[in-house]
Amino acid sequence: MSNITQVVRTDRNMTTLKKTIIATNLDQVLSSTGPYTFFAPSDAAFAKLEANEVDDLLKKENTEKLSDLLNSHLVEGKIVFRDLEDGQKLKTINGKELSVQVKNGTVHIDKAEILGHDMKTSNGVIHCLDTVLN
């Protein structure tokens, strides 16, 4: 079974995410033992950002800012979709708090909707988001 980094590298809806995790060396963390829950922004999520924002974040001088942004999508432990509960709070690896909202079978992490979920990996699980968390 592939780890989180390997899944992101091969998923055709996560090409922007792949660039960002390589630029920040987060691929090293996402290849480690874990387990992790990664709320992964899709290419469509990155497309919602301001024009040129991704290009700016990928610049060498913005590596720390990009790393912080990506780390706010990563939670220690494996949390499958059915275990996400309305009102639940999740702490990211950089200390930010994410709020879970569940309504009529739809799950939001802060303002981002989970579109694809429970992509199993050897070191955790990936849930695909429609919006970049910030």
Image (tube, grey):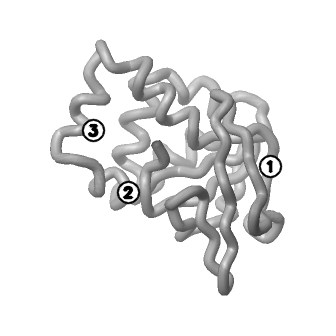
Q: Which residue ends up furthest to the top in the rendered image?
A: 61
Q: Nearer the viewer, residue 55 or 16?
A: 55
User: Residue at left 43%, top 50%?
Assistant: 132
Using the numbered discs, state the Cα–Cα distance from disc 1 to disc 3 in whole angstroms. Answer: 28 Å
Is 125 positioned to the left or the right of 65 in the image? right
Q: Which residue ends up furthest to the left in the rendered image?
A: 51
In the rendered image of this protein, does residue 5 appear above or below residue 107?
Answer: above
Q: Secondary structure at mark 2?
A: helix
In the rendered image of this protein, does residue 64 appear above or below residue 113?
Answer: above
Q: Nearer the viewer, residue 32 or 72?
A: 72
Residue at numbered disc 1: 78
Q: Amino acid at mark 2?
A: Ala
The quadrant where residue 105 appears: bottom right
Do labels 1 and 3 touch, CB within 8 Å?
A: no
In the rendered image of this protein, does residue 132 appear above or below residue 53?
Answer: below
Ranked by sequence position, the earlier of labels 2 and 1 is: 2
Residue at numbered disc 2: 45
Q: Secondary structure at mark 3?
A: helix
Q: Nearer the viewer, residue 125 or 99?
A: 99
Q: Nearer the viewer, residue 130 or 111?
A: 111
Using the numbered discs, state the Cα–Cα distance from disc 2 to disc 3 in whole angstroms. Answer: 11 Å
User: Residue at left 54%, top 29%?
Assistant: 27
Rendered location of residue 45, percent (x, y): 38, 57
Is 7 positioned to the left or the right of 19 in the image? right
Residue at numbered disc 3: 54
Q: Amino acid at mark 3?
A: Val
The quadrant where residue 92 appears: top right
Q: Amino acid at mark 1?
A: Lys
Rendered location of residue 60, percent (x, y): 30, 15
Is 25 positioned to the left or the right of 38 in the image? left
